[in-house]
Image (tube, rainbow, N blue to C red):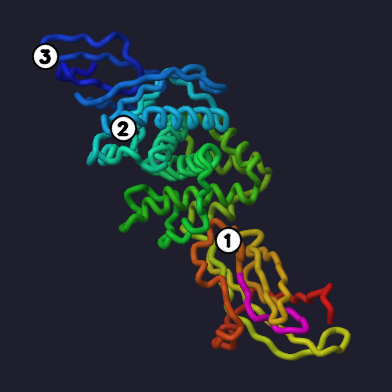
Amino acid sequence: MIKVPLGYTVAATGFPTTPPVEEKLTKTYHFYADDVHDFAWAASPNFLYVEEKFSAPGVPGVKIKLYLDPLHKELKSRYFQAAKKALTRYSEWYGEYPYSTLSIVVPPNGGNGAGGMEYPTLITGWAASSAQPSLELERVIVHEIGHQWWYGMAASNEFEEAWLDEGFTSYAEDKVMEREYGQLPSLAIEATYVTHPVALSTFSWKFGPNGRYADNVYTRGKLVLSAIEQQIGKEKMDRVLKVYFQRYKFKHPNTKNFQSVLEGVTKQSWSGFFEAYVYGGMMSDYAVEGIKTHETKSPDGKAAYESDVLIRKLGGPWPSVPVRFHFSDGTVKDSVWDSESGDMLYKLVHTAPVNWVQVDPLHTLVLESRQINNYMKTDVDLKWGLRLSVGLQKLIETLISGLAW
Ligand SMILES: [Zn+2]
């Protein structure tokens, strides 16, 4: 039961069981909701109220209730469209939206303290500060609706394992924004924002200063899921998330439950990956440590150069790190290195010396946080001798074949 001054409109979790009862100065609402673990409401004398009914496969029938700020009165259809696209995709990908209502509250200008929040069957958009907002309007709606699946229905512990909520929601949000609005995420760039990686299993209040909570829980959490997707492919990743949601909705799953679903679907152990990136605070970080070239002879006795290239593993493991070697005659050689086995020394024999080396030349490694050390030109290496003496875990020899000697 919520009692407000007569001129106010109330938005709340669930649906009204009776029409509001008006008295002289007050109005009384009764709301009810099944299968929710929280409740929220908002009241304002200024809400412009609009509703639309919607159904789709996986959305049996929902009344979308929009409580709009007057500044956005021309933008109704953008809110409804974003909500319908999000409901449709998340239901298709993860599982049904079982509730009969979804309320969207738009706070007034200056009200972002209450903006971009999720509660069961009620979300808030970004505060209305411009009559022509960017696509951030849609992105916030898509994100908050995503929470209905992870915070709302899966209902993992959002304080103790926040990444299972915000990381998953941010990952899902990117997928809808890409699919429905053509906005591609810049994962490689986002990875560079994570300057202080912390274990994702850290309690929310223990992440430390300067945005480390957000950088890890939202960005790194999302990147970890993207990294898993990169290794197993989109189709299998969709399967993992669907099985996880279906198996654990309304059951408060934890990180171990997610890992066990991932291991079940992919039929492989992920313990090394989880130790580094989830239970540990690692990012990937691979560096071109040094290049050294000297004259030699090719196997058939012709003049050639041997270029020794040392690649260091400074962060977590990745099974296939792309490395590109560029020779002074323009020849390019690509290799893939399994970083799980540690550092790598490449020995390359060719008619010309290597003149630059780049790890991850196409920026495909979504957990690679320090790209500054991914590239090296031969003539800038002054410390090779010193660095080479640092113990090598692995040595490999590669002869370039198929080239004209
Ligand atoms: Zn969120």
Q: Nearer the viewer, residue 394 or 374?
A: 374
Q: Earlier in the sequence, mark 1 or mark 3?
A: 3
Density class for disc 2 (Cα within 10 Å; few <14, some 14-19, many ≥20) is many
Disc 1 and disc 2: Cα gap in Å? 39 Å
Checking the image for residue 363, the label placed there is 1
Tell me whether the residue at label 3 lies in contact with that at label 2, contact meaning CB atoms closer than 8 angstroms.
no
Q: Is residue 281 magenta?
A: no
Q: Secondary structure at mark 2?
A: helix
Q: Secondary structure at mark 3?
A: loop
Q: Could you say where residue 334 lies in the image, as x and y percent from the top left? A: 71, 68
Mark 2 C-beta to ligand 1 under 8 Å: no
Quadrant where the C terminus sits is bottom right
Q: Is 222 rendered above or below residue 79?
A: below
Q: Could you say where residue 342 lies in the image, as x and y percent from the top left? A: 62, 68
Q: Earlier in the sequence, mark 3 or mark 2?
A: 3
Mark 3 — residue? Answer: 25
Q: Nearer the viewer, residue 228 or 93?
A: 93
Q: Earlier in the sequence, mark 1 or mark 2?
A: 2
Mark 2 — residue? Answer: 72
- Furthest residue toward left: 24
- The magenta stretch is 347-358
Residue type marked 3: Leu
Disc 3 and disc 2: Cα gap in Å? 29 Å
Density class for disc 3 (Cα within 10 Å; few <14, some 14-19, many ≥20) is few
Residue type marked 2: His
Q: Is 336 rendered above or below residue 165?
A: below
